[in-house]
Image (tube, rainbow, N blue to C red):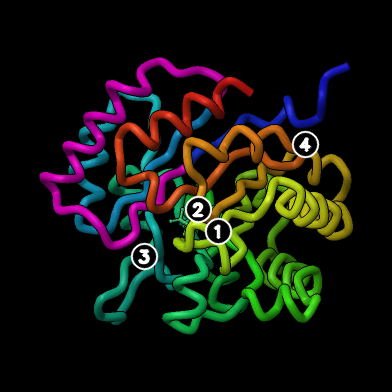
């Protein structure tokens, strides 16, 4: 019998956050191209900062690594000083855009409505959103994890049809595990991933739920990826800190490709 997870191609994405100059980014990407050459069974994405997208995109052409952005404005265009729209990202070769990352939510005050608008703008421009969700430590301790996740899924995907969902990826990133070195245990992560899939089934249907890829994010490292990816509902990882290092990201991707 084919495991349902086998229908979902593993996706490993690197979120470079506000790191690297052009020269440093090219060094990283050239190392990744060498280290991950013709790696099968896994989809690879890197999400550099805005000023790096053009040159990293050029460096990636002809490779199997896709380009993603970390943020977007929801309007098509207009007088929004300092913002970047989906059409501009698409034009530069981005295929993915992270929306709703916890740093956007908590440092920059983005709420679910903003995240939903961004997600729809990404889909409308023909790219794939990576919708990030996750509870804070105090929400987990107050037993609010499932409530928070349910709200973030429902509001984040409001007005998105089944086709839009099929073009989307969800990343479960418990806020307490991001950049802290504290990973959720595979069981803790699996519990929430399975809950998210259940919510997708409720909002759409079983087929949509089975097809959706759900990444885990939060202190993913070469030494914990295998245990995470083994879980039935974990379909990849969104990697922050370890994606800035050629050897660490290649080791994560190679191990994930083995499953
Ligand atoms: P981290 O970041 O891997 O450094 O914890 C993950 C993320 O923020 O996407």
- Give me the disc on residue 85: 3
| Mark 3–mark 2 distance (CA, rounded to whole Å) | 29 Å
Residue of label 2 = 219
105 and 63: which is toward the camera: 105
* Lateral position of residue 214 relative to residue 22, left or right: right
Residue 27 appears at what percent x and percent y? 17, 36
State the image coordinates of residue 229 (x, y, percent, origin top left). Answer: 65, 36
- Disc 1 on helix, strand or loop? loop
Q: How far apart are marks 3 and 4 (CA)?
A: 35 Å
Front position among marks 1 and 4: 1
For the residues marked 3 and 1, what is the alpha-carbon distance in whole angstroms?
34 Å
Contact (Cβ within 8 Å) of mark 2 with mark 1? yes
Ligand 1 within 8 angstroms of badge 2 C-beta: yes
> Which label sits in the foreground, 3 or 4?
4
Q: Residue at x 57, y 61 (%)?
A: 132
Query: What residue range appears in magenta?
Result: 13-41
Q: Residue 232 carries which label?
A: 4
Residue at (20% x, 44% y) in the render:
25
Q: In this view, does 38 lie to the left or right of 227?
A: left
Residue 36 to residue 116: above or below: above
């Amino acid at each position: 019998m084919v495991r349902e997870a086998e229908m979902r191609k593993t996706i490993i994405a690197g979120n470079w956050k506000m790191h690297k100059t052009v020269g440093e980014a090219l060094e990283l990407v050239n190392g990744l191209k060498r280290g991950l050459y013709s790696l099968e069974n896994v989809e690879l994405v890197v999400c550099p900062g805005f000023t790096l997208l053009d040159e990293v995109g050029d460096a990636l052409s002809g490779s199997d690594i896709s380009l993603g952005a970390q943020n977007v404005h929801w309007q098509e265009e207009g007088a929004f000083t300092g913002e970047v729209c989906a059409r501009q990202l698409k034009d530069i070769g981005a295929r993915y855009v992270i929306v709703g990352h916890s740093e956007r939510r908590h440092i920059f005050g983005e709420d679910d409505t903003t995240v939903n608008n961004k997600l729809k703008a990404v889909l409308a421009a023909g790219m794939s959103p990576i919708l990030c969700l996750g509870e804070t430590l105090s929400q987990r301790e107050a037993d609010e994890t499932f409530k928070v996740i349910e709200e973030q899924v429902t509001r984040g995907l409001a007005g998105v049809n089944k086709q839009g969902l099929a073009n989307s990826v969800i990343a479960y990133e418990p806020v307490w595990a991001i950049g802290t070195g504290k990973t959720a245990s595979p069981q803790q992560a699996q519990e929430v991933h399975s809950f998210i899939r259940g919510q997708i089934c409720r909002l759409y249907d079983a087929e949509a739920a089975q097809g959706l890829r759900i990444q885990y994010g939060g202190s993913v490292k070469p030494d914990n990826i295998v245990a995470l990816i083994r879980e039935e509902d974990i379909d990849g990882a969104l990697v922050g800190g370890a994606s800035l290092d050629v050897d660490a990201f290649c080791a994560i991707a190679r191990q994930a490709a083995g499953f």
